[in-house]
Image (cartoon, rainbow, N blue to C red):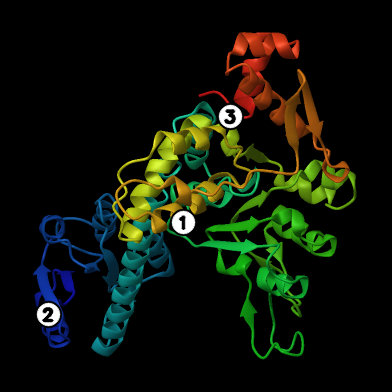
Amino acid sequence: MSSLILIIEDERLLCKQLHKALTQEGYSVITSFEGSEGLEIAKKENPDLVLLDLKLPDRNGLEVLKTFTSFEQSPTTIMMTAHGSVEVAVSAIRDGAYDFIEKPFPLDKLKVMVRNALRTTELRDSLSAVAHRAQEKYGFDSLIGTSEPIQEILYLFKRLTDTDPKTILISGESGTGKGLAAKILHFNGIRNEKPFIELNCAAIPETLLESELFGHEAGAFTDAKKLKKGILEQADGGTVFLDEIGDMSLSLQAKLVKAVEERSFRRLGGNRDITVDISVVAATNQDLKTLVKNGDFREDLYHRLNVITFEMPALRNRMDDIMDLTEHFISYFNVDLNKNIKEIPEEINRAFHQYNWPGNVRELRSTLERAILLSEDSVLNSKYVKLEYDESLNVENSDEKMVIDVPLDDASLYKIEKKVITKALELNDWNQTRTADMLGITREVLRYRMKKWGLLS
């Protein structure tokens, strides 16, 4: 399908010449001799490109250009004038024109300008389509759940995407969805049509990580055959997501401080500063405060990152979302694996609610993927649901005593507390009042502990 070009020009001879030349190039062309008529045609036909004269009999071309910007999809516009000046050109570009050409002009020059403008439009539309698909994939509803922790996170996301935060720090255990959170913030924010580039700081050797971040000049090191832009430069206008930043070396952290603070850096082997407009989102599953205290993370970088910060909740702290997540993953894998799982046995539901999920949502997803893949009919088969219970801690009752076998190299209070509470509940048939009396605590404290470990049904 050929591109549609609208010419708004009151010089009829020039208009006829342009119509003929552009039609011969394979474009569809419509002409108008007045600004008001041209606006009506533009509204109706939605042209890909407009050639707009500055001086029109009924109104100024700059006024027409400003009106174009109010359209739902503003057409790419090239201004034409016999009264060219730097001031007029700057005004036209500032008001949204793609380019500016002074009469009289060679037709070949205009043809090149038209081709370039249409290529730019195609690229813009392509990027817009990609951004739209990403918005659908990473909309707010991609964070599954109705629990209070998730609702609080969603409320914060909606507040953040209305603004343009330059630095965000996301903490949380592995598998809680920190990467998903970064994508939701980017693709629903004002930078959504600009690049989103992710870098896992733990997955790349330090020697390569610096080049990936900042880029390098040709000859900067032995294998640097040509100039390479780093992700900070590639993401200009968009978002850089630095995952597992707590694993970055101290020497590289020192170089990152300036980039985060001033949005300025130098390529490896370079001698000039490069300035970029980026939003930096960092994520970690470690306690950066503790790393700073122990000298394993730079305090100045921590304070630069710690502007907007939040923690993605662990799955054990949002157990109300287990079934919503389970149904979501079943629907996804039914399509992806060509399966037809429709029923989840109660024993699986109960096991999921009693399990601690150390791997969080990522573990739930992989657990379901395996079970769905191996189940033969429409019922999710419990024998294929493999949960990795910790067998290193054993709690038994003998002669009216609770015997706890704790390996000395793994005497985790975290594990002991959950095992004792679970065993006490089992001994009392999950009666909370009797269990609280047995443990010497109030029922309210017991329920708090049960909720903490995901033991409340």
Identify which residue, 331 or 425, lies in the foreground.
Answer: 425
Instruction: Kindly report the distance in space between the C-alpha atoms of the residues bearing marks 1 and 2.
Output: 63 Å
* Quadrant of the rendered image containing residue 113: bottom left
**Image check: 260 left or right of 319?**
right
Residue 138 x/y as whole percent: 42, 50
The earlier-in-sequence mark between 3 and 1 is: 1
Helix, strand or loop at label 3? It is loop
Q: Amino acid at mark 1?
A: Arg
Query: Which residue: 44% across, 30% down?
Result: 146
Label annotation for residue 454: 3
Helix, strand or loop at label 1? It is helix
Identify which residue, 447 or 176, lies in the foreground.
Answer: 447
Mark 2 or mark 3, whichever is nearer to me: 3
Residue 308 x/y as whole percent: 64, 39
Q: Which residue is mark 2?
A: 19
Query: Which residue: 38% across, 53% down?
Result: 137
Label annotation for residue 370: 1
The earlier-in-sequence mark between 1 and 2 is: 2
Q: Amino acid at mark 3?
A: Gly
* Quadrant of the rendered image containing residue 426: top right
